[in-house]
Amino acid sequence: MFRILPRIPTPLPLVLALAALSCAPGARLTAEEQLKLANGDVVTGELVKETATTVDLRRTLLVKHLVKVSITSIHKDQILSRAKVPDAPELYKTRAAGVGDSMEEQCALARWCIEHVLVDRAVIHTGKAAEAAPDSPMVARLYTDLGFVKTPDGKWMKEDEYLAQTGQVDLGGKIMSPAEAEARKGLYRATSEHDAAAQQVKDLQFVVDHYAERITDMQKKLDAAKSAQSESQARAKSAQAQAEAAARRAAANKAQTGNGYGNNNRRGGQQQQAQTSGDPAGEYAQANTDAESAAREFATCTRRLASLQATLEKAKTDLPAAKERLTKADAELDKAKAGVPGGDAARAAVKVPVDAPAKTAAAK
């Protein structure tokens, strides 16, 4: 005999606290699911949902030095194996225990912390690596991945803190003054307008230089299609007349046979049929099909010729204005270059959308 125990209600504050913990971006369980997939990938995260066909994991990732939380849904037929594994903080304790103080070992541990989104610990170990080798490219890469910038005096600072301290902005991954950022955005706009204007002139000039020849070729095709159409129509008309004559002779022969005029009349009718072509009705049908095909080709050539002529005339009309636009764009580009430090080398403007705001400390 089983006895049902009374359910002990969970206090509401505790329920809310647990819900908040499970939904927090950095929240981790003491164990996570590790899935080995058929394509060779290994995916680790917190199990949030499982159905008959899929497994959903909450994964914490570091994207451009910012912590992001995403839900990854994986089909079970792609999973080769799955196991419970300790969460990242637990794994870190074991991994960090045997790590030495050399730059290489500290960099390796810092990189592992980044991959497992242990950002604070990654900063600590990157700092220890910097103490051993301040100018190491590996250290610089780690700091950059963590969102740090190197100050003019050689120190590493969080980018948002540095921007707030200096009043500078980040545009396209480069730190500069707000005035330079605006100048570079102006250079980007001027370069884009210049390139568009130059391409427009090039396209229109091509039409002006080559479409007259295309029009001549299309006119020849149109004349050939017109000739083929006339010839097919004439053949169809002739074949129709022959088919109608053959039908009349056949009707007459049938009438004579029915009235009993004898074998002589039948032989005469057969001789007349032998003198005509083999299949007048078939020849008429083929000639009519050829005439329709020639008519379609004629109509197509007519449309294409009209389109080529219209395109050429429009290009001749638009080309002067396009050249004027390019001249103006040249002047604006020179003006924009002059406003950006670096002279002609500054033409390689930061490739960001024209209307993209510069990133400031507040924007981060």
Image: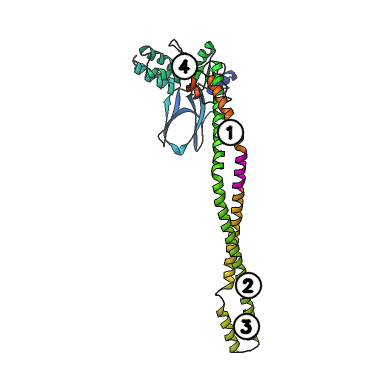
Q: Mark 1 or 4, which is nearer the eye?
A: 1
Q: Earlier in the sequence, mark 2 or mark 4?
A: 4
Question: Residue 253, labelled with which disc?
Answer: 3
Residue at coordinates 61% horizontally, 89% vertically from top-left? Answer: 262
Which of the 4 image quarters holds residue 183?
Answer: top right
Q: Position of residue 244 (x, y in %)?
A: 63, 74
The reply to whether discs 3 and 2 touch (Cβ–Cβ < 8 Å) is no
Q: Is residue 138 left or right of 47 when viewed as pictured?
A: left
Q: Which residue is mark 2?
A: 241
Q: Mark 2 or 1, which is nearer the eye?
A: 1
Residue 198 seen: yes
Q: Which residue is mark 1?
A: 323
Query: Badge 2: how crowded within 10 Å, few (<14), some, or many (20+)?
Result: some
Q: Earlier in the sequence, mark 1 or mark 3?
A: 3
Mark 1 and mark 4: Cα distance apart in space: 47 Å
Query: Badge 3: how crowded within 10 Å, few (<14), some, or many (20+)?
Result: some
Query: Badge 4: how crowded within 10 Å, few (<14), some, or many (20+)?
Result: many
Residue range corresponding to the magenta coloring: 307-317
Q: Which residue is mark 4?
A: 148
